[in-house]
Amino acid sequence: MRKPFIAGNWKMNTNSATAVALASGLVKELDSVDTVDVSVCPPFVYLQSVAAALSASNIALGAQDVFYESNGAFTGEISCEMLKDCSCSYVILGHSERRHIIGETDELINKKVKAAISGGLLPIFCVGELLEERDAGKTMEVVESQIRKGLDGLCKERVQAVTIAYEPVWAIGTGRTATPQQAQEVHAMIRGLLETLFDKNVAQAMRIQYGGSAKPSNTAELMVQPDVDGLLVGGASLKVADFSQMVKTVA
Ligand code: 13P
């Protein structure tokens, strides 16, 4: 059985006070939950203060990106070692905002996924189609290509560090959630692809999150889908009440 995994992507939100208040509020609400893996991913600059607020809790810390080199002249970048040093367990990679606003390519994301695993981090590897790609009937093709390229070169043992997050771009921050059937259809395709690329055991063990306007009111209907193993939550993860309600619904 795959343990459900709910992660909060805080994106470029919070400040030093509200980040700690959000983390502390979640610790209070969620401390007795042990049937769901929970993680929050604050901006880099608040990782250490959020880590302190989460210490001795079940909530894991994640970052929103990482660079693939371990140190040196890479102005503005952050390494896996630095994230580990700040108590991070997870790192979000290939988020659609980094693909489409910053211009990250599949090749760059693949380097980051491999570096993260080698560096002892657990990647949350994001994939998802644009609205025009869905409307053109290309959803499966786009997602399959992102997964093949993003996981290229990984063996069965190493790929199991990865959580895949299916985030249809048209559902992110729009209030327009994919229907549970739309999510399940893509998640099932992804699991089938993992079986083709690796094997059945790997495909059955790996977790696939859904992301895109996930909120308390649609958590249950998404999570009952057989191949939806968790959620990557944006806006609703910035409110203690909403995010903790989502985790409790899943628990
Ligand atoms: P929203 O939940 O705000 O739609 O964001 C989803 C997301 O991009 C999480 O990574």
Image (spheres, rainbow, N blue to C red):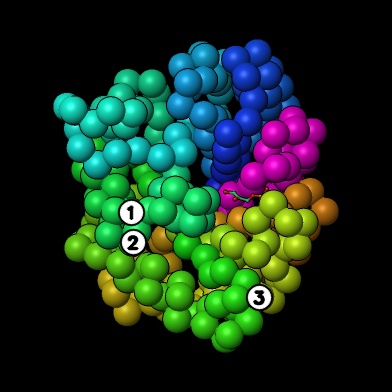
> Does 24 sit above or below residue 69?
above
Q: In the image, what residue type sits under mark 3?
A: Gln
Q: Residue at x 52, y 14 (%)?
A: 49
Which image quarter: residue 235?
top right
Residue 31 drawn in magenta: no
Q: Which residues are magenta?
A: 229-251
Q: Which secondary structure, mark 3?
A: helix
Q: How many marks do you count on the picture?
A: 3
The answer to whether the residue bearing label 2 lies less than 8 angstroms from the nearest atom of ligand 1 is no
Q: Position of residue 224 (x, y in %)?
A: 69, 65
Does any portion of residue 34 appear in the rendered image? no
Q: Residue at x 39, y 23 (%)?
A: 87
Residue 246 drawn in magenta: yes
Left or right for 18, reference 227? right
For the residue carrying disc 1, how many other residues have a C-alpha within 10 Å: few (<14), some (14-19), or many (20+)?
many
Residue under label 3, please give it.
182
> Does 38 sit above or below residue 212?
above
Label 3, label 1: how far apart the Cα atoms are? 25 Å
Residue under label 1, please give it.
109
For the residue carrying disc 3, how many other residues have a C-alpha within 10 Å: few (<14), some (14-19), or many (20+)?
few
Q: Position of residue 61 (x, y in %)?
A: 48, 30
Which image quarter: residue 180?
bottom right
The one nearer the camera, 213 or 248, is: 213
The answer to whether the residue labelled 3 contacts the one labelled 2, judged by CB atoms less than 8 Å apart, is no
Left or right for 22, reference 6? right
The one nearer the camera, 117 or 136, is: 136
